[in-house]
Amino acid sequence: MEGKPRVAILTSLVDYSPAYSLVGIILDQARALHRHGYEYDILCLKNFNKKDEERIKKEGLHAKYILPQTYLHDYQPNEPARKTATDPKTSQVVLGFDDQVEVHFNGDPEKGWVGYKDALKSYEVVIDHDLMFLSWHLPQNEALRRCMKMWPRKNWLHWVHSGPSSAPADLCHPSTLRFTHGGGHYVYLNETQRLEYSLMIQTTKDEVSTVYNPKDIRDLYGFSKDTCALIDRYDLLDHEILMVYPFSTPRYKDKGIRQLLRLFSNWRKQKIKARLILVNAHCNSAVDQPKLKAIEAYATLCELELDKDVILTSRFADENEGYKLWRYTVPYKVVQDLMLASNMFIFPSVSECCSLIQAEASISGKFMVLNRDFPPMLEFSHPGVLTYEFTGNDPDANQAYYECVAREIWANFKSDAAIMNATKARTQFYNRDWIFRTQFEPLLYRRFSGDPRVVPVAPEPVRPEPPSDLPPQFRAALEFEGPSGETVNVPIEKVLVEKKKPAAVIKATKPPIEVLLANAEERAAEEPSNLASTDEPDWNDPKPGILCPIFGTCSEERRSNCYEEAGHCLMLDEVIEAK
């Protein structure tokens, strides 16, 4: 693997209908991978209904329609595997369980179906959805287990979208596949039931991770690409307090900008993650520049960091050539989106009659704080809304007042369950960035040691190189499945050192190693003579023992000591057994 791993999203989808919630979840995964620069494919059925394919292509998403489709049967726990039979009503052959497994694993060239063993070759990470869980998909479950044995170094991630259950007493094959760990790593949708699901498949909690389903505010309300660009640039959805304040730059004093900056300064000192977005229009002429500089200087005086604690849309326009017009006015759609994303609105203005921005903040359910010194705005609010004397308390002359106000606002804000619940939902539980960064992306690297995004695993003990005078019978080669599905011939001494597992058969020189090791367990109890000799053993000796690159042949006792204490090699009988 070089750089980011290539990902396959393995599905059983028949169309992109939004009525099926799993469709949205799979597409959200593809969007996340697409946004973060991963190569991926959504793998769908060959006879997929492509009526909505153009919509998917417009998003830049891509899929392959190649997988087999067989008759799905909802196996009951005590129901044995079905046999292939002819349907008396339709005279069509209905494949039984074993034949369905073969089709999903090997495909069917006549029908243009590509089996898993060919479809998944070129991917380092394979994500499947419910294929290892639902009783409808037991043939796919078994086919995937075969793939995991074939490619143990791939990263297999099995998403589970339904509630766990206990195995009944009369459980039989193939339903046993639902209730056992099949290899790879499982992903559940909530932390509360993670242990319960791990018990269902008879494994530990460590073999199951939690990844939430995203329902991001940007997707839910259809934020514009310009809004999303602003959010991404400043990571605006990572906040405890987010406030949006549109105003005309030349009138910044009447609009109470200094009062706002003092409040946010106190929240910064309290280590509260508070973000203030100043949508400052009318700053495109030379006469406006001194006032813009005064705002920036005052924010710095209040120990606020520009572009982090305080974001001015004029500075975003300066950074991006395509947004120069924002210096005069920011599109209403962007302001509307930002207002939906925010959770607080403080209004220290003294220049209003019937404020439209107050109306938008109130209608969208923001936590409201108004200027008590300007009674007209109180006419449009509930009597229980917080009010403070912003005009009568100069933010420079009475800084202690703003410290107290900031603490009181925060205390009331935290006690508002509806506001806090919405904030958590927007910034964490359903936020696509938080989910990808903290839950999803680390799983993509869980099998690749050395990546900074995952906790490093303890390295395997270093095994010594085999002796240079290794007997010629050890110069055979093993045929392996390479990382991209290609055939790789590896010298057997390397296998002995690194404990690799062959995917196919041993290609040995004459006589075959299989012959040498036949009935090895029965012969292993006897200690052969001249263990240190590197001469080729007598192939006709009925008791040659077990081959070892260090000693030539070993007894059971010596083999145990060698493997457990020195870790010199993997015994060839284990290699044969692992093929």
Image (cartoon, rainbow, N blue to C red):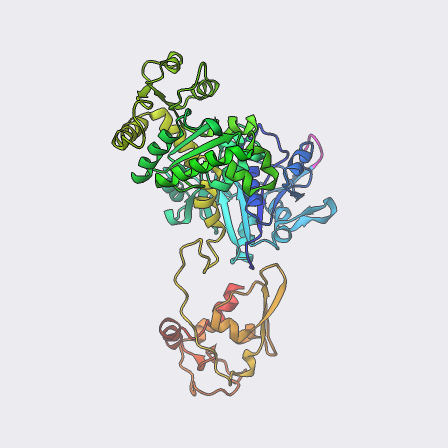
What range of the chain is rendered magenta? 87-92
The residue furthest right is: 110
Q: Is residue 88 inside the magenta stretch?
A: yes
Instruction: Looking at the picture, tell me which residue is in the foreground, 391 or 157.
Output: 391
Q: Is residue 268 inside the magenta stretch?
A: no
How many numbered marks appear?
Answer: 0
Residue 91 image-quadrant placement: top right
Instruction: Looking at the picture, tell me which residue is in the foreground, 460 or 414.
Output: 414
Residue 354 image offset from top left, x and y in percent: 45, 14
Relative to 276, residue 358 above or below: above
In the image, what residue occupies the spot 48% across and 47% down?
A: 441
Relative to 22, residue 43 above or below: below
The residue furthest front is: 287
In the image, what residue occupies the spot 58% across and 60% down?
A: 483
For the question of whether residue 172 can be seen, the reply is no
The residue furthest top is: 379
Residue 472 image offset from top left, x and y in percent: 56, 82
For the question of whether residue 275 can be seen, the reply is yes
Q: Main secondary structure of the magenta part?
A: loop
Instruction: Looking at the picture, tell me which residue is in the foreground, 426 or 128.
Output: 426
Please indicate whether residue 28 sits to the left or right of residue 245 in the image: right
Residue 66 image-quadrant placement: top right
Quarter of the image with the N terminus is bottom right
Quarter of the image with the C terminus is bottom right
Residue 270 image offset from top left, x and y in percent: 29, 38
Please indicate whether residue 305 sits to the left or right of residue 69 in the image: left
Relative to 29, residue 256 above or below: above
Residue 388 image offset from top left, x and y in percent: 30, 22
